[in-house]
Amino acid sequence: MMFMCSGSSEDDAAKEAARQEAARQEAARREVARQEEEAWLDANPLEKARREAAKQEEARQEEARREEARRDAARLEMARQKEAKQEEARRAKARRKEARQEAARQEEARQEETRHEEARREEARLDAARQKAAVALIRRLQPPVSNEGAWVRREDFRGRKSFGAFKCPQCRNMWTSAHAQVEYKQGCKACNCESLPVAMWVNSERHTHGDYVRDNNGENKPHDGRRVKRGAPATVNPTANS
């Protein structure tokens, strides 16, 4: 085994020496050829000058090609930079447009919130005015029956049906009805404008009107809404504060 390895190493060394010798000989032949060519050119100055001129022309053309390649690369770079600037300008324009749209949306939302807030304040003012008017009307109203009780605002009434006091929002006419219901409107006898009751009567003895009214004979029977559409004029206490 050791003998085989030793023989392989010697073969490799011989091959390497042969390659080196071949390379040396090739270099020697090239050197001899170069020297012969130089000697021939020295003997033929016109050919030498022609070849020198050809080399210079080739070098000039190569330099021209390289210069053209550099100019082309510069033009491409400028074109890329210009395209990048244009793209950045488009993006900046899009961002400005989006910012304007966002600002417009925010302004619209702010204005909408302002309108809602103003509507809420207006509704609160109207509700306060309605409450004030209801309280003023309640103070002026006289009891509709001899039973003990009190007038309350419609919003504070917990029943479904009772005596009700109305005030027309259009002509300011006032009337009472024995068949008022919290969620049903009645028409004004003067102008036909319909409105909800402003106040409802609550009996202290807790026997409310319910779903029936008592007729002249003392019998209980269902109320006919077709016959009693509009109530009688409200009875107002002239000595009460308005």
Image (cartoon, helix red, strand yellow):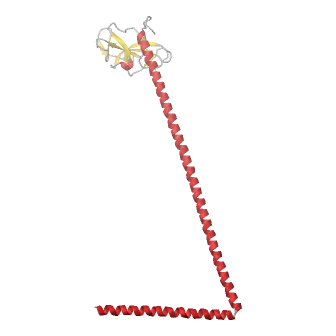
Camera-side residue of 171 and 130: 130
Q: Residue at x 62, y 74 (%)?
A: 66
- Whole-percent x, y for residue 92 in the image: 56, 51
Place residue 30 in its image quadrant.
bottom right
Q: Residue at x 56, y 55 (%)?
A: 88
Q: Is residue 53 left or right of residue 154?
A: right
- Whole-percent x, y for residue 71 in the image: 63, 69
Place residue 144 in its image quadrant.
top left
Camera-side residue of 72 and 50: 50
Q: Residue at x 68, y 95 (%)?
A: 43
Camera-side residue of 126 and 166: 126
Residue lying farthest to the top in this orientation? 239
- Whole-percent x, y for residue 28 in the image: 54, 93
- Residue 16 seen in render: yes
Camera-side residue of 46 and 195: 46
Image quadrant containing the N terminus? bottom left
Q: Is residue 149 left or right of residue 125?
A: left
In the image, residue 88 above or below residue 125: below
Residue lying farthest to the right in this orientation? 46
In the image, residue 57 above or below residue 195: below
In the image, residue 98 above or below residue 41: above
Place residue 16 in its image quadrant.
bottom left
Q: Residue at x 37, y 93 (%)?
A: 10
Query: How many numbered marks, from 0 up?
Result: 0
Q: Is residue 206 left or right of residue 64?
A: left
- Whole-percent x, y for residue 69 in the image: 61, 72
- Residue 230 seen in render: no
